[in-house]
Image (cartoon, grey):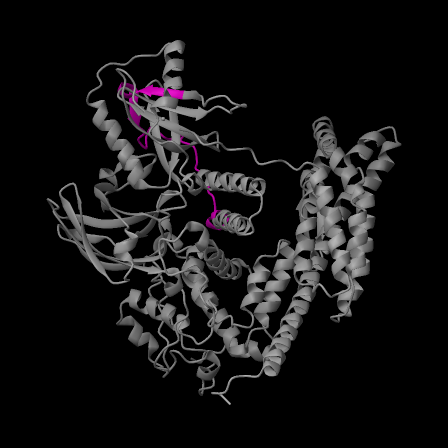
Amino acid sequence: HGTEASSPGSDLCLFLLQSELDLEKGLEMRKWVLSGILASEETYLSHLEALLLPMKPLKAAATTSQPVLTSQQIETIFFKVPELYEIHKEFYDGLFPRVQQWSHQQRVGDLFQKLASQLGVYRAFVDNYGVAMETAEKCCQANTQFAEISEVLVTLNKDAKDQTTKNSLETLLYKPVDRVTRSTLVLHDLLKHTPSSHPDHPLLQDALRISQNFLSSINEEITPRRQSMTVKKGEHRQLLKDSFMVELVEGARKLRHVFLFTDLLLCTKLKKQSGGKTQQYDCKWYIPLTDLSFQTVDESEAAPNIPLVLDEELDAMKIKISQIKNDIQREKRANKGSKAIERLKKKLSEQESLLLLMSPSMAFRVHNRNGKSYTFLISSDYERAEWRENIREQQKKCFKSFSLTSVELQMLTNSCVKLQTVHSIPLTINKEDDESPGLYGFLNVIVHSATGFKQSSNLYCTLEVDSFGYFVNKAKTRVYRDTAEPNWNEEFEIELEGSQTLRILCYEKCYNKTKITKEDGESTDRIMGKGQVQLDPQALQDRDWQRTVIAMNGIEVKLSIKFTSREFSLKRMPSRKQTGVFGVKIAVVTKKPRSHRPAVGCAGLRQVGYAPISALLADNKDVSVMMSEMDVNAIAGTLKLYFRELPEPLFTDEFYPNFAEGIALSDPVAKESCMLNLLLSLPEANLLTFLFLLDHLKRVAEKETVNKMSLHNLATVFGPTLLRPSEKESKVPANPSQPISMTDSWSLEVMSQVQVLLYFLQLEAIPAPDSKRQSTLFSTEV
C-alpha cells in the first residue's frame, strides 16, 4: 500500500494513536517530576529540622539564671519555623504514598492546592526575616556560645546513611525564602506534564494562581535598571576614542564609559535619570597621559583577583536572552499591545546588560604614577591592544603633568554627552532596524600560513568573533617553532551568534621567562600583528571555501573561510554508505561478536582544541596502533562525524524531548531524579556507549590546563551531535542574515542540547546500571 493515498479513517487512527503515545509520555514525565518534588521536600524538611533542633535547649536555658538567649529573641529568630515544618511534613506524608502507589489516574492536585492555601505562614516568615537576621547577628556578637551554635547546625542527609551536612543559621534561615520564591516553578513543571483532561489540572492551576498572587505581593527584589549611555569632539582637547568597559571595583563589576582624550584618560558612569532630564555623566577618575603607565608584574603584587564567572552561568544568561526574544516575536505575531512588548524589551535590555557585565575576564590595568591603579575587564585582546597602542601613540605628544580644578572636571564630564562616538551600550536591543543582524551558524576557518616576519621566532594565531554584542576569543593555533614562515594549516569550527567580523591576532610565544614582557600581572606574549575581515552574508552564502589574505603591520596571514547556516551544520546527516559502523544503528553494530559498543580509543589527551578526544570507530583490534600513526585532529573529527552520521542520536529520538524537558526543570533535586531516570532508560548499547564516552570526556577535561578543553567546551562540541534528533525539519529559514529573532528558537534548542551533556559531565557520580549492564560496561573487550 506504499503508493496509495491513505484514507481519512486511517489518518484519524494514526492521529489518535500518536496523541495516545504523547499522553503516555507526558504522564510518565509527571511521575518523574513528582519523584523529584518528593526528594526536594525531604531535603527541605531536613533543613527545617536542623533549625528546630537548637530551639528546645535554648528555650529551656531561657528560664534559667544563665540564658543563652531570651524567650523573645528565640521567638524572633525562629519565628514560624515550627509551623512551616508541620505544613511541609503533612504535605510530604500525603504525597509519598500516592507516588509509591503510582498510576496515571493518581491524583495529587488537592495536596498542592492545600499547600498553596497555607502560604500566609510564609508571608509572616518573610515579613519577619529581616528582623530575624538582624537579631541573630546581634546575638552572635553578644554571646559566643550562640555564635558557635549558629555556625554548626547539622542537617541529616537522608540519601546517604549517617551522612550529615553542617550549615550556618544564616544559610538555613534563608531556605524558606528561597523555597517560597521557587514555589511557582515546581507547579509550572508539574502542570506542563499534566493533561488538561486530568482531574488534577484545575487544582494545580488554582494552586499556581494562588502562588503567583502571593509572590507578586511580597515584592521580590527588582533587578536594577540599566540605562544606555552615550560620547564627540571638544575644543582644544580632542576626543580620540571611547567605549564601554567593565571596571573591577573592590571585587564588583561596574559598567563604565571610558574616554581617551588627547591629554588624559577619563572614566565615567552615567547618572540615573529622572523624568525628562538629559543624560549626565559622573566622573569616577581621570589620569593625565604623562602620569599613566601599564602596570607591570612587579607593581601589581596587590592587583585584585578577577572573579571567575563560569561558562554555564553565561550560557544560562544567553538562554534567557533567547527566550525573551522568542517571547517578543510571539507577542508581535499575536498583535498584542505595545505595553507587553515594552516590558519584554526592558527585560531583554537588563539581561543583555548583565551578560555584557559578566562576560569579560581579561585584565587591562592602568596605573597612575601618583600611586593609584585601576583594573578593567575586557573580552578581546584585540581591543586591549588597540587601547594600549592609542594611549602610547598619544603619550609621545604629551610632555607635562597637570591637574583639573573641580569646575574644569565638571565641564569636561558634561561635554561627554555631546562628544561621544559610541552612542549606546553594544546590545542587540540597541541596534537600529536597518542594521545587519549578522550571521547565525558555523564558520569554518583554515589558518594556512603567514609571511613578512623579519626574523625566526615561535608564532601562533588566535581568532575572535563578535557575539552577543562583544568580541570573544574562539580559537588558537599551535605554536610554530623557530620560523619566519609558519605553515599552520589548521582548521577551526566557530559558532556565530549574530556575528559580523572575524579578527585574527598573530603572537610571538615567549618561552624565556626572563625576557617576557609582563603586563597586567600576567605573562604576555608579544602581539606581532592584528587584522580583521568583515563577514559578508551575500559572499558567504554559497557555502564554498573562500581564500583571503589579511594584511597586518607588514605581515600577511592566509586564510580560507566557509560559512554554514545552522540548518545545515547541525542537521543529522545519515551516511550514504552504510557499511562497517558509520551510518549504522548502534544496536546493529553491537550485535557483532565481542562488540558491546563501537570501538572507541583515546590518544593525544594533551593536544589543544577538541583534538583531546581521539577516537577511531572500527571493528579492528589494532585501533590503538592505527591511531598512533594518525593526525589527532582528524581522529577527533572522525568521532564527531560518527555520532553525527548515526541514523538517530545516541540519546534516541524517543527520549530527546524528555531530556529537553528534564534539563529545563527548575528544582535541582527533581531535575537530577528525572535526568538519571531518563538516562538509565536508554537502550543498553546507547547507554554503555554514552557512559564510556562520558568517562573519556571527563579525563580529557582533567588536562584542561594543557588542552584548553573544559567540561563546558566539550559539551559545546559534542552536545548537539549526541542529541540532535534525526527527523526534524529546521525551523530556521535558509537566509543566513535573517533577523535575529527568527533564529532564537534554534539557539534555545542548541543550548538545551549542550546543557544536557554538560549536566551529565558535571554529575559527580551516575548510579551503576543493573548487574548485566554493569558487567558489559566494565568488560575489557573491544
- In this view, 239 is above or below 47: above
Magenta stretch containing residue 444, yes or no? no
Q: Which one is nearer the viewer's eye here, 546 or 264?
A: 546
- In this view, 780 is above or below 238: below
- Image location of residue 289, percent across then percent down: 28, 21
Looking at the image, residue 119 sits to the left or right of residue 571; the answer is right
Of all residues, the one furthest to the bottom in this rendering is 1
- In this view, 441 is above or below 503: below
Classify residue 717 by image quadrant: bottom left
Q: How many callouts does the rendering have?
A: 0
Does residue 509 appear in this view?
no
- Image location of residue 360, percent across then percent down: 41, 40
- Image location of residue 152, percent across then percent down: 69, 42
Q: Which one is nearer the viewer's eye here, 623 or 683?
A: 683
- Image location of residue 552, percent across then percent down: 18, 43
Looking at the image, residue 639 sits to the left or right of residue 116; the answer is left
Does residue 776 appear in this view?
yes
Magenta range is 285-314
Q: Which one is nearer the viewer's eye here, 676 or 65?
A: 676
Q: Quadrant of the C terminus?
A: bottom left
For the point 76% across and 33% down, the residue is 128
